[in-house]
Image (cartoon, helix red, strand yellow):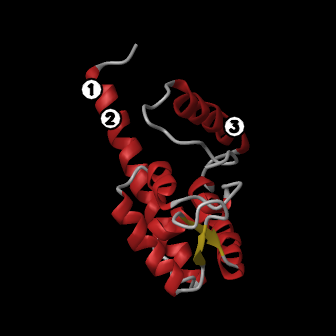
Amino acid sequence: MTTPDSDDLLAEQLLRLTRRVHRIQKRHLEQRGLGVTPAQARLLRTLAHCDTPPRMADLAQRLEVVPRAVTTLVDGLETGGKVRRVPDPTNRRVIRIELTDDGHKAVQQLWRARVSAAEEILDPLTTVERAVLSGLLDALVDGAPEQGRGPGPGRAC
């Protein structure tokens, strides 16, 4: 049985771990010299999971941000040659966002940076502890559906 104090401690531990994960991932990104922010990296990873190039509004919904934030991210990534705006083939008034070849390469580098960061974070754990943690994380992630949550990785945008 949990107590309010133990729940507070767990919440604090989760927040501290989240901040640590972000710091380590950011460092690994910087070491690879990709020239993308963590928010841009998230957009690139999201695009990589889309079956077809999404609209800006689709990206905003998927990333759970306001459309203006997506515009700013896309502007920066387009300037860096990692994405491009393309007209929708069925409605030229609609603009879609797709990865360029450099964008696909960046996604691979991002994946490697995430793996390196995960290895660093998980290094103190034994194989058994990692398996237990994996099960616990699955239970937390899959346990309660979130309102307004977009499709997960591997599903269309």
Q: List the single residue furthest toward the top.
A: 1
Horizontal and vertical percent position of residue 107: 66, 70
Tell me the tag on residue 5.
Answer: 1
Q: Give left or right: position of 2 versus 33.
A: left
**Sooner in the amino-acid sequence: mark 1 or mark 3:** 1
**Sooner in the amino-acid sequence: mark 3 or mark 2:** 2
Which of 44 and 31 lies nearest the eye of the viewer?
44
Q: Is 123 located above or below residue 152 in the figure?
A: below
Horizontal and vertical percent position of residue 18: 43, 51
Tell me how far mark 2 sits from mark 1, CA to CA.
6 Å
Tell me how far mark 3 sits from mark 2, CA to CA.
23 Å
Q: Is 67 located above or below residue 137 in the figure?
A: below
Residue in the image at 41% along x and 69% along y = 71
The answer to the question of whether label 2 and label 1 lie on touching residues, with beta carbons closer than 8 A, is: yes
Instruction: Look at label 2 and name its amino acid.
Output: Leu
Q: For residue 70, which quarter of the picture? A: bottom left
Q: Which residue is mark 3?
A: 131
Crowding at mark 1 (Cα within 10 Å: few <14, some 14-19, many 20+):
few
Residue in the image at 53% along x and 68% along y = 41
Q: Which residue is mark 2?
A: 9
- State the SS at label 2: helix
- State the SS at label 1: helix
Which of 25 and 150 lies nearest the eye of the viewer?
150
Crowding at mark 2 (Cα within 10 Å: few <14, some 14-19, many 20+):
few
Query: How many numbered marks are there?
Result: 3
Which of 58 and 7 lies nearest the eye of the viewer?
58
Crowding at mark 3 (Cα within 10 Å: few <14, some 14-19, many 20+):
few
Instruction: Look at label 1 and name its amino acid.
Output: Asp
- State the SS at label 3: helix
Q: For residue 83, which quarter of the picture? A: bottom right
Horizontal and vertical percent position of residue 129: 65, 39
Q: Quadrant of the N terminus?
A: top left
